[in-house]
């Protein structure tokens, strides 16, 4: 197993990314408190965007400031917002934001104003405490048709087989590359252990492939994952661009959690530079309000993508998310429909076994097949070890394992694919039992409480993992300055992981839960008859 230095991870988590106090220089920012349109903060270069100095903007209302645009002549001339856009802003600021689940709701205003640098698009975001209005160059007219082209019909198709799923992921990468113009686009999926894996990729000729490579969990700390969960996209047009500070009134600290312009962490800048990436663009894939993965786009030179084009790319990702959800639902439904009758027959057979009756089918085979295991154990607190099936440790080792489960994991369902890492004595028999799935059912025999346990075991399955660089080098600090430093190598690095079994899939866990529920209903029915 790969071990990451907790000190490195803790230091990453302590980076207050949402309070970084600066933005990237490709736009301007205004901000204030929720429920109050008064401007409490602004980017230091506001005059280059709106022709109004930052100091003059502070204390004005948003409507009052924007209404001034166009009142000057000459080089500072501009065009104010249309009245209906100002009304939209007023209405949005007057309404408290809804509790966020997944992506935050944001208001996009196309061609809100024309400032010193030309037309500006805007995006308004709000938390319970504060609002932000961010301005950036509008999408040029000659790019409108490209940005607003329809979503490819094929992306709406729901993949049904593994081959169709792989083609679906690649199609998204191709469409994103076409829209964004980035040299490399990757579909990046998070794994249960927090690591990430590139499952689809489209790259320009000559670039080293990243397809199939994994990245350690520390590459994207939890604090950064929270920001990805809240925002549909994140752009870094140029890692070498100097950040612009935000000027705020005393006592007001801008929260940049929902900011598109938020400045980049120095650690992430160095990380991208180590990858030889100058511009990046990321889109979050959110499924059931959880971060399923990212679409990561890389380019070797600066490349800003206008807001409308980013929003269109995010729409593609949203359509792709429907395919992810449908594909996973199809897998679960297929597994459930195939298992229902087998579960009922197995439960009836176990009841006959415990009653001493004859069997018309082999319970052991059915029990192992239920969760695709190589060994199974049936035990309870009254009779002790009742039966074993397939590959299992010897009785003394099983007694110790069952006692450990009773003491440390009394929950109805417990699962691990690295048993020896949780229960050290299991290292002596990890070849036969590195994965464990335990189901516990409580019932009564007379006045006595009895706990019945079903334990399934999977053998060790050494895994060959191709990492994008040695993941252990994510644990580095700069030895001289004691500052956080990302790893510098992303060359393919091979690791063989031992002590692990094939992970238990969601469909297997669902079958185990249904099996437990059916047995519990049978036991309760028996109690009522008695």
Image: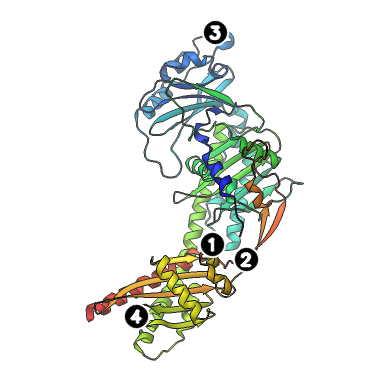
Left or right of 75: which side holds 299? Answer: right
Question: Could you classify mark 4 by the number of other residues whose Cα lies within 10 Å: few (under 14), some (14-19), or many (20 or more)?
Answer: few
Q: Disc 4 versus disc 3: distance between alpha carbons?
A: 91 Å
Q: Could you say which quadrant of the image residue 97 lies in?
A: top left
Q: Which label sits on residue 498?
A: 2
The first of marks 2 and 4 along the sequence is 4
Q: Dot 2 lies on which element?
A: loop
Q: Element under label 3?
A: loop
| Earlier residue among tags 4 and 1 | 1
User: How many other residues sit within 10 Å of disc 3, few (<14), some (14-19) or many (≥20)?
Assistant: few
Mark 1 or mark 2: name the one nearer the start of the chain.
1
Comparing labels 2 and 4, the label whose residue is closer to the camera: 4
1 and 2 marks in contact (CB < 8 Å): no
Q: Secondary structure at mark 4?
A: loop
Q: Is residue 267 above or below residue 153?
A: above
Please provide percent x and percent y for residue 225. Answer: 52, 44
What residue is pinned by disc 1?
A: 160
> Toward which corner of the image does residue 498 lie, by quadrant?
bottom right
């Amino acid at each position: 197993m790969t071990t990451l230095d907790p000190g490195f991870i803790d230091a990453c988590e302590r980076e207050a990314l949402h309070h970084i106090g600066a933005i990237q220089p490709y736009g301007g920012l205004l901000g204030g408190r929720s429920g109050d349109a008064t401007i409490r903060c602004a980017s230091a270069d506001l005059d280059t965007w709106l022709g109004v100095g930052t100091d003059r903007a502070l204390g004005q209302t948003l409507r009052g400031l924007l209404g001034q645009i166009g009142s000057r002549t000459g080089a500072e001339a501009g065009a104010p917002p249309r009245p209906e856009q100002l009304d939209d802003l007023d209405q949005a600021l007057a309404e408290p934001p809804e509790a966020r689940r997944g992506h935050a709701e944001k208001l996009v205003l196309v061609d809100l104003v024309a400032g010193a640098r030309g037309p500006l698009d805007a995006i308004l975001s709000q938390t319970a405490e504060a609002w932000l209005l961010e301005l950036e160059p509008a999408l040029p007219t000659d790019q409108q048709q490209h940005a607003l082209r329809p979503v490819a019909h094929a992306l709406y198709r729901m993949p049904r087989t593994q081959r169709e799923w792989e083609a679906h992921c690649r199609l998204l990468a191709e469409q994103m590359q076409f829209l964004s113009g980035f040299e490399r686009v990757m579909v990046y999926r998070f794994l249960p252990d927090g690591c990430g894996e590139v499952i689809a990729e489209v790259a320009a000729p000559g670039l080293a492939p990243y397809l199939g490579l994994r990245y350690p969990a520390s590459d994207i700390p939890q604090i950064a994952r929270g920001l990805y969960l809240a925002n549909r996209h994140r752009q870094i047009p140029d890692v070498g661009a100097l950040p612009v500070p935000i000027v705020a009134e005393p006592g007001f600290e801008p929260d940049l959690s929902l900011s598109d312009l938020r400045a980049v962490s120095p650690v992430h800048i160095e990380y991208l530079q180590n990858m030889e990436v100058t511009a990046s663009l990321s889109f979050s894939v959110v499924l059931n309000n959880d971060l399923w993965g990212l679409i990561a786009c890389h380019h070797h030179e600066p490349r800003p993508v206008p807001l409308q084009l980013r929003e269109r790319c995010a729409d593609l990702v949203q359509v792709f998310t429907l395919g992810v959800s449908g594909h996973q639902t199809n897998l679960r439904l297929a597994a459930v429909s195939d298992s229902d009758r087998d579960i009922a027959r197995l439960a009836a057979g176990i009841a006959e076994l415990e009653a001493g009756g004859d069997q018309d089918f082999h319970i052991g085979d059915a029990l192992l097949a239920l969760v695709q295991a190589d060994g199974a154990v049936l035990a309870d607190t009254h009779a002790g070890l009742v039966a074993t099936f397939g590959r299992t440790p010897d009785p003394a080792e099983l007694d110790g394992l069952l006692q450990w489960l009773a003491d440390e994991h009394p929950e109805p369902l417990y699962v691990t694919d690295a048993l020896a890492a949780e229960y050290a004595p299991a290292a002596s028999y990890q070849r036969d039992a590195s994965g464990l799935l335990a189901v516990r059912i409580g019932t009564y025999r007379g006045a006595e409480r009895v706990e019945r346990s079903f334990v399934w075991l999977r053998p060790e399955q050494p895994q060959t993992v191709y990492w994008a660089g040695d993941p252990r080098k994510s644990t580095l600090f700069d030895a001289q300055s004691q500052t956080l430093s990302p790893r510098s190598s992303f060359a393919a690095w091979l690791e063989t992981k031992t002590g692990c079994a094939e992970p238990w899939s969601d469909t297997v866990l669902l079958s185990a839960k249904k099996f437990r529920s059916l047995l519990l209903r049978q036991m309760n029915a028996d109690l009522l008859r008695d």
